[in-house]
């Protein structure tokens, strides 16, 4: 195969030009977007070409082999025969290499299809955040709002008065050794978190396919790309596109929003300074923003829990919880913990399918209790 022709670049193309060509073609022929019969095989060819040409060492070897094969082909290849095996390969739904005619692994075809479906879910989630308006006034009834306000008031009425005699806590709080088979992950510029043996840090082939597509798609939708999370943790097996990686769904994401000094409160702000009416007002603002942001997309909020001000591991935070659903897919429980730190805000997002709560809930509670922010302002 001529990888340069597949990507539409010259042999002298830079890595930047190759990456740009890949992003454009991958979007055009992504199986979830392009429903033509040839889209899947073209997408695979595009990815194979990109994986070789982006690597300088692989590209150098390919260039040498390709040049030699082209010289031999000029002398020995019968065009009609060459065309015939191509047509046969297409009819049989198989892929062959130009040099050795080996079958392309059916497993990879299957995994690419699964990745395409997962990509559409991820893109759909981010699309939900771009639509702003006043639709929430018609979606959220005054009765529901009143019930939610009552729930907030009842929650804060159950909290005992603050003990004014307690000593100031030094942060970050000390941590015991991780549990057996758990891993302690260090996040540069943030701190640490422990993850269970059922989860892994996003990397590998899955991240390699997802990352080039996400930023440009987000920009075309007029939404600033938020793909550069400090870390994304997911169910184990997804990185290598194994079947077990798609049997469940869970995410732990940490994102840092950096501003100027004074843009945010301190990491240990006094949650008692905020009245119930302040909390109700903030709850309504956040809820309305998310509901209107999802209008016109496949995403919707099916249940909203009262916003809370909490102290997690000695750190004050705003806790936002809700249940969302994408089209007719299983519902997902989401918890966002927002920690303010003078000139930045850290958002810890935990999510999993509701029907898998028994599988994830205990581990997520341990995971949350292990979270530490070391960069104390």
Image: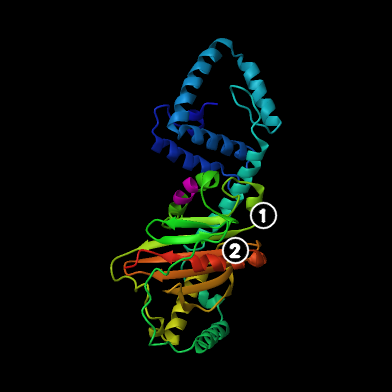
Image quadrant occupied by the N terminus: top right
103 is higher (above) or lower (below) than 346:
above
Q: Which residues are magenta?
A: 211-216
User: Principal SS element in the magenta part?
Assistant: helix
Q: CA distance from mark 2 to mark 1?
A: 12 Å
The residue beneath circle 2 is 352
Judge left or right: residue 89 versus residue 160: right
30 is higher (above) or lower (below) than 169:
above
x then y, percent, for residue 122? 54, 55
Image quadrant occupied by the C terminus: bottom left
Secondary structure category for the residue under label 1: loop
Q: Residue at x 64, y 24 (%)?
A: 101
147 is higher (above) or lower (below) than 365:
below
Membership of 212 in magenta stretch: yes
Q: Which numbered disc, 2 or 1, marks the residue that appears first in the sequence?
A: 1
Residue 364 showing in the rendered view: yes
The residue beneath circle 1 is 247
């Amino acid at each position: 195969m001529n990888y340069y022709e597949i990507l539409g670049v010259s042999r002298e193309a830079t890595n930047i030009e190759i990456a740009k060509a890949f992003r454009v073609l991958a979007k055009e022929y992504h199986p979830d977007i392009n429903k033509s019969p040839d889209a899947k095989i073209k997408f695979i060819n595009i990815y194979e070409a990109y994986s070789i040409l982006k690597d300088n060492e692989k590209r150098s070897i390919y260039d040498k082999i390709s040049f030699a094969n082209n010289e031999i082909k000029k002398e020995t290849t019968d065009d009609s025969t060459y065309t015939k095996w191509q047509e046969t390969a297409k009819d049989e739904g198989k892929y062959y290499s130009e040099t050795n005619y080996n079958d392309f692994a059916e497993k990879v075809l299957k995994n690419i299809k699964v990745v395409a479906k997962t990509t559409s879910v991820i893109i759909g989630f981010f699309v939900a955040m771009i639509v702003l308006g006043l639709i929430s006034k018609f979606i959220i009834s005054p009765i529901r709002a009143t019930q939610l306000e009552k729930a907030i008031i009842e929650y804060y009425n159950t909290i005992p008065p603050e003990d004014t005699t307690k000593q100031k806590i030094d942060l970050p709080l000390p941590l015991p050794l991780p549990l057996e088979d758990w891993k302690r992950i260090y996040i540069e510029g943030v701190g640490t978190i422990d993850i269970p043996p059922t989860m892994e840090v996003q990397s590998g082939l899955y991240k390699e396919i997802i990352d080039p597509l996400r930023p440009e798609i987000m920009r075309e939708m007029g939404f600033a790309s938020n793909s550069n999370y400090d870390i994304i943790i997911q169910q184990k097996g997804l990185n290598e596109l194994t079947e077990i990686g798609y049997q469940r769904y869970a995410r732990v994401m940490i994102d840092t929003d950096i501003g100027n000094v004074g843009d945010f409160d301190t990491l240990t702000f006094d949650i008692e300074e905020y009245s119930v009416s302040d909390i109700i007002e903030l709850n309504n603002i956040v809820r309305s923003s998310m509901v209107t942001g999802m209008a016109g997309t496949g995403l919707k909020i099916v249940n909203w829990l009262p916003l809370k001000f909490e102290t997690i591991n000695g750190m004050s935070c705003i806790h936002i919880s809700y249940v969302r659903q994408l089209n007719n897919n299983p519902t997902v429980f989401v918890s966002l913990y927002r920690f303010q730190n003078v000139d930045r805000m850290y958002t810890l997002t935990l999510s999993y399918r509701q029907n898998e709560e028994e599988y994830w809930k205990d581990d997520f509670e341990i995971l949350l209790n292990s979270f530490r922010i070391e960069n104390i302002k």
